[in-house]
């Protein structure tokens, strides 16, 4: 799920359209406030056709609706008389909320938010700029493009990727990634990364995995990061995780609360509680959950997208977030983006399953189930796929579908209910059919190009989640098609230019899971038997985000991947299995953890079975 890496909060917008320009304003284009401002239109191929016919440029303001500096751009830059005059003379202004268009968001993720991109009428890029541009900078940029429309230094030829020949990383590549991962840790301030400070989910999860395998130093780094995140970047009043802290320390938060951050942090704190049984981590997870329920949950049980960084758009809110609950509410509540996207709900369902597994509290499972069922009822496409929103101007997108496949897989893991495994398979087959890149490794963000001048591309975090989801689906079903699917994504993830992108932990986790069998834990007993239920819950509470947990009730027929023959017993029992053996029956829930630890001790690298 990480799914999904931090993106710096900046974006730029631009382009005013002549009053005679007959283009429909899309739902993602918005007027910012009273006063002169560009007549924003939505992104479409028609925009480029109009620009070509009228000898105009297209300026894309790719914003985030929760982003402080995007608001500042709207209030300062896009109300400046010089900027408006230049836009009106030669530009068409397009504004897009990046959350609404995963394809554009992935395409320009290194430039936002805000991101300002200027195109010619052919859809070719002329300039790409990252972050806030003041009125002087913007006016100079617009004038320079009119004077000389040749592409500037920000537009470079796309680097040719050297795809991995084998989905399994070479030993030298793996060791190089491990060195990069170690170098990415900030020993002085804590956490992975040296600029913005935040809990990078992949980096902490990989450190916790290494700790399980005996690396105490990695465990200390994980716990340091978790503790800093909880202390500084979780709102003590309303709960919820701020996006990050600026100025290379932990005490200058940007106050937006985004679904991806809530889902990542909630899942990681749940996994940390399962591993360390530190009540601080459960408290952190509950603080994030409290925010999700109180501010981000719709009446139907699905989850919204974000809460704004600013109470008043464009005005810093540090003083506001220092207030108590009553004082905040007296002034008002920052705006919540109430779109309901399949992708964000898939992420949150996954995290709620992790919190249920770690805590045993069925309220979290009920919320996960309700949100998943809402997406099924309201975002389902034919053949197992999902749309992003109720009505998409483009898509479908890989992000929504792999997030929902993962959500279904996790619901199966924590319930043993085969309807969820069936849905995970259907959605993964939709992924394979819809987003396949032909003979080229990786799965595409979207089958359709964002515009005629651009070819669809894979994106790193989405393909890491494809590897992890498809690989675990193979272990649950025994179907080789999912190994092939994971291998196709892994060859992209393992390409040197992709794998070495921060954070290195994402590729390392994908490689580890692809090359190692998960811990295999099974309960044999009827699902209405309380003893079997207690054994299953004890298994869910065990440490580790990479587990194959199954519940065999013989009244339902064989397990989907029935490679283990369990002995006939007259009462419920649990088993801890490897690729070669299973433990003796375990009848007491409190004995399960010690059996797993014995299995882990025998499985430390390189003795672990590795896929060749």
Image: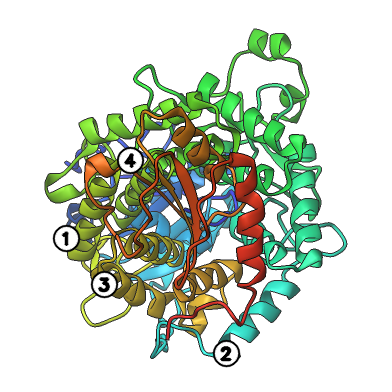
- Which quadrant holds residue 304? top left
Q: Position of residue 252 (x, y in %)?
A: 78, 43
Describe residue 192's horizontal placement relative to residue 533 as left or right: right
Residue drawn at point x = 50 percent, y = 74 percent: 511
Q: Position of residue 130 (x, y in %)?
A: 55, 59
Which residue is label 2 attached to?
Answer: 171
Which residue is label 1 attached to?
Answer: 53
Q: Is residue 460 above or below residue 235?
A: below
Categorize mark 4 by other alpha carbons within 10 Å: few (<14), some (14-19), many (20+). Answer: many
How far is mark 2 from mark 4, CA to CA?
38 Å
Which residue is label 3 attached to?
Answer: 480
Categorize mark 1 by other alpha carbons within 10 Å: few (<14), some (14-19), many (20+). Answer: few
Residue 458 shows in this picture: yes
Q: Nearer the viewer, mark 3 or mark 4?
A: 3
N-terminal-most mark, 4 or 1: 1
How far is mark 1 from mark 3, CA to CA?
52 Å
- Does dot 2 land on a helix, a strand or a loop? helix
- Does dot 3 land on a helix, a strand or a loop? helix
Q: Position of residue 401 (x, y in %)?
A: 29, 51
Residue 18 shows in this picture: no
Which residue is label 4 attached to?
Answer: 342
How far is mark 4 from mark 1, CA to CA?
37 Å
- Which quadrant holds residue 386? top left
- Does dot 4 land on a helix, a strand or a loop? helix
Q: Nearer the viewer, mark 1 or mark 3?
A: 3
N-terminal-most mark, 2 or 4: 2
């Amino acid at each position: 799920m990480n799914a999904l890496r931090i993106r710096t909060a900046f974006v730029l917008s631009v382009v005013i359209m002549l009053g005679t320009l007959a283009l429909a304003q899309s739902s993602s284009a918005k007027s910012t406030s009273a006063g002169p401002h560009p007549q924003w239109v939505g992104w479409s191929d028609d925009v480029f056709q109009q620009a070509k016919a009228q000898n105009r440029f297209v300026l894309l303001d790719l914003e985030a609706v929760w982003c402080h500096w995007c608001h500042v751009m709207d209030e300062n830059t896009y109300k400046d008389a010089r900027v408006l005059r230049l836009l009106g003379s030669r530009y068409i202004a397009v504004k897009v909320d990046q959350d609404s268009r995963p394809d554009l968001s992935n395409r320009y993720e290194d430039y936002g938010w805000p991101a300002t991109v200027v195109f010619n009428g052919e859809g070719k890029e002329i300039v790409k700029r990252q972050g806030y541009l003041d009125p002087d900078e913007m006016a100079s940029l617009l004038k320079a493009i009119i004077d000389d429309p040749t592409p500037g230094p920000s537009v470079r030829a796309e680097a040719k990727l050297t795809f991995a020949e084998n989905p399994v990383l070479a030993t030298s590549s793996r060791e190089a990634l491990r060195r990069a991962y170690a170098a990415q840790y900030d020993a002085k301030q804590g956490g992975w990364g040296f600029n913005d400070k935040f809990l990078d989910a992949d980096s902490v999860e990989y450190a916790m995995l290494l700790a399980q395998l005996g690396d105490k130093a990695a465990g200390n780094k994980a716990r340091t990061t978790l503790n800093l995140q909880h202390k500084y970047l979780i709102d003590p009043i309303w709960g919820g995780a701020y996006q990050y802290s600026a100025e290379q320390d932990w005490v200058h938060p940007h106050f937006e609360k985004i679904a991806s951050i809530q889902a990542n942090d909630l899942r990681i704190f749940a996994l940390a509680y399962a591993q360390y049984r530190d009540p601080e981590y459960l408290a952190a997870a509950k603080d994030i959950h409290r925010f999700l329920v109180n501010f981000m949950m719709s009446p139907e049980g699905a989850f919204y997208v974000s809460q704004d960084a600013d109470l008043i758009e464009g005005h810093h809110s540090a003083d506001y977030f220092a207030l108590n609950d009553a004082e905040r509410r007296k002034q008002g509540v920052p705006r919540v983006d109430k779109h309901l996207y399949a992708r964000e709900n898939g992420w949150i369902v996954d995290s709620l399953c992790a919190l249920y597994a770690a805590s045993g509290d069925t309220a979290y499972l009920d919320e996960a189930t309700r949100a998943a069922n809402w997406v099924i009822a309201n975002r389902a496409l034919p053949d197992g796929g999902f749309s992003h929103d109720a009505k998409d101007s483009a898509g479908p997108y890989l992000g929504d579908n792999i997030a929902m496949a993962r959500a279904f897989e996790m619901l199966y893991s924590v319930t043993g209910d085969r309807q969820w495994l069936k849905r995970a398979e259907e959605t993964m087959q939709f992924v394979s059919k819809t987003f396949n890149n032909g003979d080229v490794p990786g799965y595409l963000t979207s089958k359709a190009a964002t515009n005629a001048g651009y070819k669809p591309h894979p994106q790193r975090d989405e393909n890491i989640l494809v590897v992890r989801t498809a690989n675990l689906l193979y272990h649950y079903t025994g179907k080789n098609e999912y190994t092939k699917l994971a291998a196709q994504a892994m060859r992209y993830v393992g390409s040197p230019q992709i794998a070495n992108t921060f954070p290195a932990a994402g590729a390392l986790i994908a490689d580890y899971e692809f090359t190692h069998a998960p811990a295999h834990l099974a309960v044999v007993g009827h699902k209405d038997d309380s003893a079997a239920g207690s054994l299953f819950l004890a298994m869910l509470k065990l440490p580790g985000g990479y587990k194959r947990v199954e519940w065999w009730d013989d009244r339902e027929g064989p397990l989907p991947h029935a490679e283990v023959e369990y002995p006939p017993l007259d009462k419920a029992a649990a088993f801890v299995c490897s690729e070669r053996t299973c433990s003796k029956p375990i009848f007491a829930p409190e004995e399960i953890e010690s059996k797993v630890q014995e299995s882990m001790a025998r499985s430390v690298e390189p003795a672990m079975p590795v896929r060749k």
